[in-house]
Image: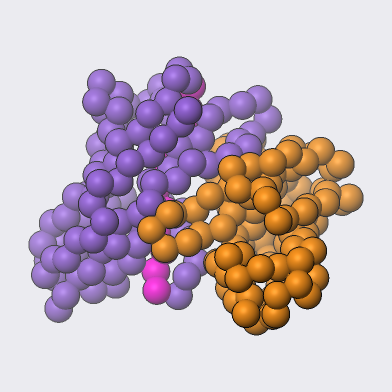
Chain colours: A purple, B orange
Amino acid sequence: AQKVTQAQTEISVVEKEDVTLDCVYETRDTTYYLFWYKQPPSGELVFLIRRNSFDEQNEISGRYSWNFQKSTSSFNFTITASQVVDSAVYFCALSEAREGGSEKLVFGKGTKLTVNP
Amino acid sequence: EAQVTQNPRYLITVTGKKLTVTCSQNMNHEYMSWYRQDPGLGLRQIYYSMNVEVTDKGDVPEGYKVSRKEKRNFPLILESPSPNQTSLYFCASSGVNYEQYFGPGTRLTVT
């Protein structure tokens, strides 16, 4: 069965610190997708990134970067120079790749990030 | 604008009073799902639908019903709500790019 583990329940940092959110996944599929979502205090789920299992290139988007390592089944998320607006719950999720689209995302339990001024 | 809409956004109801949460998407997606979010448990899938008239159970389907009569709509029905269904509910749809678009959420309280 698929499983996503976010071992860090809560993280608190001071503004401008770098912070890494860990995500470890389990799947028997060779083709799958990994996602990160942000849930700010307002409650909506904001899509951050999608990565397929055949693409292990790291990705950088502004202050955000993602490190995908298939060898350790990890898909970690780093925020550089954190800001108060980064305070949110962050979810890592795993989806099996099925023809025509996804049926289910398996979510980790989330990491609550608090960035203090 | 591509979006998933849900209504109502907030609902307080009493045990046993049937309710429906509507979900609609304008992206012509075949796949739609319902999730519930509970503290400490993350998001768990309730039901999903691969196309019109095709639905299947997710991880926590007990106490819920769904229907998919039109491609754009996927309502969630609680025929006899109970307090343990108090939760934050999200509807989602996805297309061939595997990205799931989420609605804004419906916060349900059952007293």
Side of A24 where A40 appears, left or right: right
Instruction: Please say if B106 is above or below B53.
Output: below
Total marks shown come to 0
Write down the quadrant of residue B4 in the picture. bottom right
- Please state which of residues B30 and A112 is positioned toward the viewer in this rendering: A112
Where residue A81 appears, as percent x and y from the top left, is 15, 61
Where residue B31 sits: x, y (%)? 70, 42
Residue nearest the viewer, comparing B78 with B49:
B78
Say if residue A83 shows up in the picture.
Answer: no
Q: Is residue B17 above or below residue B74?
A: below
Who's the residue at 42% across and 63% down the image?
Answer: B39
Residue visible at 70% across and 75% down? B15
Q: Residue at x 69, y 41 (%)?
A: B57
Predominant SS of the magenta segment: strand
Please state the extent of the stretch shown in magenta in the rendering: A31-41
Q: Position of residue B98 (x, y in %)?
A: 57, 38
Residue B98 shown in magenta: no
